[in-house]
Image (tube, rainbow, N blue to C red):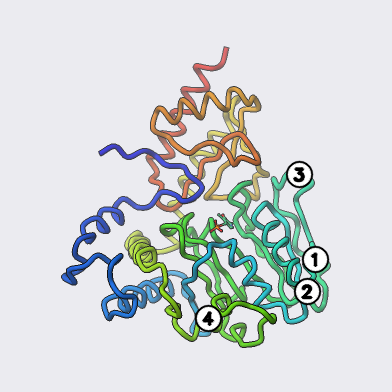
Amino acid sequence: MARVYNFSAGPAVLPEEVLREAADEMMDYKGSGQSVMEMSHRSKVYDNIIKEAEADLRELMNIPDNYKVLFLQGGASQFFAEVPMNLMKNKKAAYILTGQWAKKAFQEAKLYGEAVEVASSADKTFSYIPDCSDLDIPEDADYVYICENNTIYGTKFKTLPNTKGHLLVSDISSCFLSEPVDVTKYGVVYGGVQKNIGPAGVVIAIIREDLITDDVLPGTPTMLKWKTQADADSLYNTPPCYNIYICGKVFKWIKKMGGLTAMKAHNEKKAKILYDFLDESKMFKGTVVKEDRSLMNVPFVTGDADLDAKFVKEATEAGFVNLKGHRTVGGMRASIYNAMPIEGVEKLVEFMRNFEKENTK
Ligand SMILES: *Cc1c(COP(=O)(O)O)cnc(C)c1O
């Protein structure tokens, strides 16, 4: 069996232990004589799987009782629309633009009401997080929206914006479970799981209970109304059963690793190895302001597109895959999510060091 070091931004690397366990249970899940893929989502055995997944997530993130956990479909992109549909009572919301995903959410919100740009780092190709300590937020804005970890550009909010009493909605797709969070600071915190948790096809949304109501925008589809999903404990219709089962296994893996505090230490250690090298290298450069660097997504360049291409090609041949930067940005990007082992980053840096030596005259 030859496993590569997979630096994909998403779908991304999963813990080997989880994949092995899933393989072992493929033909017969715990004596049920069925794969989880084949069983009814209304069965007792499946009910245990989804309930346990929720309980483990609640424990990991210390989610208060007045927040609902929903397992949804449609990806984070579908959720861009669900936010205004469910929250835009005044038809106005404030958006902080720190990259493509924030921009897409912003554009989606414009379909439903007035989306106001209150800060942006577009002036420097999203290489930093703007100062959000004193923003001009419209009094009647229904919420303030951020993309907390910018998967494409490699920046992360280290402090949350001052929303001046407004509700905070945050997309944490690419930093989900990478470190402890204080859920009480958010009205809604959500993410697609395919970056740091499980197989594509599930969005996990953690929503303060009082925000889940029948008072949604007219025309909101039944499936996209949070109340529908909350009332049915995420089983209004057939959920992505197997994917939720894998998420549940990843939750258990994180618990075994020591929870989110341990995960953060593990991620900081990994990121430091790579960033330290980028800071010392004469060939490779990080593209992001130091203070705002993401622990999860690390973009870098050589400054020479041909050399970048050569690097990506040779890295791939050496078993370091998916290092090509996002198609809109170029260069390279190493996504080093929870499941990326330390050795993966150490070996990548060793490979980069050698590449630099061989390609410097
Ligand atoms: C990948 C990503 C998305 C889009 O996710 P889909 O599930 O493909 O819709 C949105 N936001 C962030 C931060 C992402 O990393």
- The quarter holding residue 214 reads bottom right
Q: What residue is pinned by disc 2?
A: 92
- Going from the N terminus, do you reach mark 1 or mark 4 first? 4
- The quarter holding residue 133 reads bottom right
- Within 10 Å of disc 3 (Cα), the crowding (few <14, some 14-19, many 20+) is few
- Going from the N terminus, do you reach mark 2 or mark 3 first? 2
Query: CA separation, marks 2 and 3?
Result: 27 Å
Query: CA separation, marks 2 and 1?
Result: 7 Å
Q: Residue at x 49, y 50 (%)?
A: 10
Callout 2: SS: strand
List x then y, in percent, for residue 252: 33, 65
Query: CA separation, marks 2 and 4?
Result: 24 Å
Amino acid type, mark 1: Val
- Going from the N terminus, do you reach mark 2 or mark 1 first? 2
Amino acid type, mark 3: Lys
Q: Is residue 92 left or right of residue 71?
A: right
Q: Residue at x 34, y 75 (%)?
A: 41
Q: Quadrant of the N terminus?
A: top left
Q: What residue is pinned by disc 1?
A: 116
- Within 10 Å of disc 4 (Cα), the crowding (few <14, some 14-19, many 20+) is many
Callout 1: SS: strand
Between 131 and 305, the one nearer to me in the picture: 305
Q: Is residue 276 left or right of residue 135?
A: left
Judged by depth in the image, the label closer to the viewer, 2 or 3, is 2
Identify whether 125 is placed above or below 189: above
Q: What residue is pinned by disc 3?
A: 124
- Circles 2 and 1, Cβ within 8 Å, touching? The answer is yes
List x then y, in percent, for residue 359: 54, 17
Between 263 and 177, the one nearer to me in the picture: 177
Q: Which mark is residue 67?
A: 4
Query: CA separation, marks 1 and 4?
Result: 27 Å
